[in-house]
Amino acid sequence: MLSRRVLLGSAAAVAAAGTARAQPSYPDRPIRLICPYPAGGATDVLTRILADGMRERLGQPVVVENRSGAGGNIGVDAVAKSTPDGYVLGTAPVGNFVINPFLYATMPYDPVRDLTPVSLTWEVPNVAVVAGKFVPARSFQEFLTWAKAKPGGVVYGTSGVGTSAHLCSELLFKRAGVACTHIPFRSAAQVIPAMLSGDVDFAIDNLASYAGVIQQGAMTALGITTERRWPTMPQVPTMAEAGIPDFVVTAWSALIGPAGLPGPVQERLAAAVQGVAADPAVLQRFLVAGGQALASTPAGARERMDRERPMWKEMVELSGARME
């Protein structure tokens, strides 16, 4: 009887070992990477650079899928409700973690309960811009003088209510004592034509969205919201140099999966992002597009989310923005 039990146990162990060996290593098929914002905007551009770098390191296609709407909530919710196997991921900017929960009356997902932050991916400064054809200012102080004298105040555009662009703009104009009117668009790709036609006076938004029109000379950059000048645009002063102190604001993003994403999958993905961030060629692509590549552990991504939550909550309350 004992021998029979030993034989059965040995057979079960062999079968289990065989099953473990038979399981394919992750990933063994294409990965969907959901971008929660429209094509052509900052998040889309940087998501595609990240996808290219991850594909090289994971050995599988990483297919970007744009699912925009509701301040990114639609796309992030699709990730939150996906199967936690690592084949549906997303890029989530700071707003989807620590702004939208204070902005929207109801949320389709809970960023703490329903998501797994895998790694930080990039950081993007905001840049203040005007269309030189319509706004005769070549410095921030010239712009403020013009804005205060403009009947009805300044019309500024953003990629949506409650975005970092909206919150930065409200904070800036309240500090400067400038009357302003906010026009929200679906993305920066819609704000830019409105500025170039004279319908919008000003924007302070992700550099990744405006780098091209600045480099082409179609817009004038008045200041950038970083501590130091940006490497690819050394001619643009920091906000402090432009006369706006204590205005260092950057928008970061993270690679996310649904809650319950297995630890080994998280580690594999985080290692891929670390490889992307260590590649000089990819780093240059990020810089040219207006972003700085980042990487972290899953714990590091969650720590930043927790640390910045109070700051963004205060900025939402200051702006008075609310979405039903």
Image (spheres, rainbow, N blue to C red):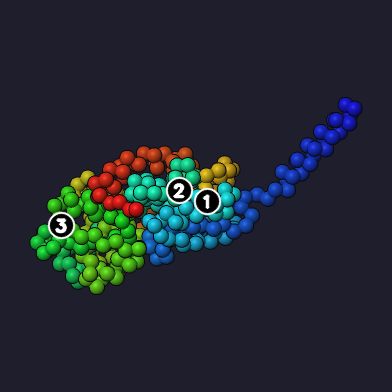
Where disc 1 sits, the SS reads loop
Residue type, mark 3 in image: Ala
211 in relation to 262, above or below? below
Give the mark nearest the N terminus, 2 or 1: 1
Residue drawn at point x = 41 percent, y = 56 percent: 72
Residue 131: image x %, image y %? 22, 67
Q: Residue furthest bottom?
A: 197
- Looking at the picture, tell me which residue is in the foreground, 33 or 143: 33
Q: Residue furthest left?
A: 149
Where disc 2 sits, the SS reads loop
Please give left or right for residue 43 compared with residue 31 in the image.
Answer: left
Where disc 3 sits, the SS reads loop
Q: CA distance from mark 1 to mark 3?
A: 42 Å
Front tag of 3 and 2: 2
Residue type, mark 2 in image: Tyr
Give the mark nearest the N terminus, 1 or 3: 1
243 in relation to 208, above or below? above
Residue 237: image x %, image y %? 23, 55
Q: Are marks 2 and 1 in contact (CB under 8 Å)?
A: yes
Quarter of the image with the N terminus is top right
Residue drawn at point x = 31 percent, y = 63 percent: 185
Give the mark nearest the N terminus, 3 or 2: 2
Residue placed under numbered mark 1 in the picture: 81
**Residue 109: numbered disc:** 2
214 in relation to 244, above or below? below
Badge 1 density bin: few <14, some 14–19, many ≥20, Cα 10 Å: some
22 in relation to 310, above or below? below
In this orientation, does residue 10 appear? yes
**Residue 179: numbered disc:** 3
